[in-house]
Image (cartoon, rainbow, N blue to C red):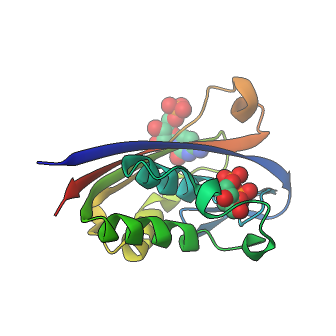
């Protein structure tokens, strides 16, 4: 059986604002994440994990941050592309697991909405998607609330 694993990691910085978008869900917060796109750090990590499993480079290779076309783009565009690429290469996505690292906002109250949204975008059963969170115990840039990090794993199986 051909099984592929990929990992993804992303960071976006906080700037003044009123919400963050994580796994496509708008979560009220007293700051927002800065980026060329909507800066959905969790969706970017999942997207990169899929590209990684396919040995297809990273999100910036497919959607260059220098391309004005992606300015303010909703990140589901990137995730849908990675999912379609997996399909076109003959792979099904078995599961994805993403951990969001921040002190605030609290993720757990929104994690089931995030799973539902990602499942819909990816055409997967919700049971194949995991969204978790941790603080960094006030250590480092996430601990100082300078930004949010996310790390993801994806497992793909040949159909
Ligand atoms: N932004 C966050 C961070 C954490 N959680 C939840 O709290 C639990 C405890 O976090 P620790 O970093 O103290 O281990 C964690 O397991 C999450 O369930 C959260 O919802 N949002
Ligand atoms: C998503 C892209 C799209 O231009 O831009 P950003 O939103 O800045 O996100 P990042 O993860 O820093 O880089 C990847 C880019 O492809």
- Quarter of the rendering occupied by the C terminus: bottom left
Q: Residue farthest to the left?
A: 1
Along the horizontal axis of the image, is 110 left or right of 3?
A: right
Rendered residue at 72%/25% (across/down): 140
Residue 130 in view: yes
Residue 132 left/right relative to 128: right
Displayed quadrant of residue 149: top right
| Residue 64 horizontal/vertical position (percent) | 70, 61
Give above or below for 136 relative to 44.
above
User: Looking at this view, is 82 or 44 the one in front?
Assistant: 82
Q: Quadrant of residue 83?
A: bottom left
Image coords of residue 82 (percent x, y): 45, 64
- Decide if residue 113 is on the left or right side of residue 104: left
Q: Position of residue 137 (x, y in %)?
A: 62, 25
Instruction: Tell me the residue at 78%/62% (across/down).
Output: 36
Pick whichever, 116 or 122, lies toward us. Answer: 122
Q: Residue at x 38, y 52 (%)?
A: 54
Q: Where in the figure is residue 115, as x and y percent of width and height? A: 41, 64
Query: Which of the 4 quarters of the picture holds residue 118?
Result: bottom left
The residue lying at 42 percent from left, 48 percent from top is 55
Whether residue 20 is visible: no
Q: Relative to 10, is 88 above or below?
A: below
**What number of labels is visible?**
0
């Amino acid at each position: 059986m051909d099984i592929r694993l990929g990992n993804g990691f992303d960071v976006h910085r906080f700037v003044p604002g009123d919400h963050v978008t994580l796994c496509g869900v708008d979560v009220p917060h007293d700051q927002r994440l800065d980026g060329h796109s909507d800066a959905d750090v969790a969706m970017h990590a999942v997207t990169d994990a899929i590209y990684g499993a396919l040995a297809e480079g990273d999100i910036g290779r497919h959607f260059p941050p220098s391309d004005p076309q992606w300015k303010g783009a909703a990140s589901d565009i990137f995730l849908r592309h990675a999912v379609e690429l997996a399909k076109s290469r003959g792979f099904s996505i078995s599961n994805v697991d993403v951990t969001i690292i921040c002190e605030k906002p609290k993720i757990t109250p929104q994690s089931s909405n995030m799973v539902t949204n990602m499942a819909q975008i990816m055409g997967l059963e919700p049971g194949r998607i995991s969204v978790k969170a941790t603080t960094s115990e006030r250590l480092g840039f996430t601990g100082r609330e300078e930004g949010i990090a996310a790390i993801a794993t994806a497992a793909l199986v040949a159909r």
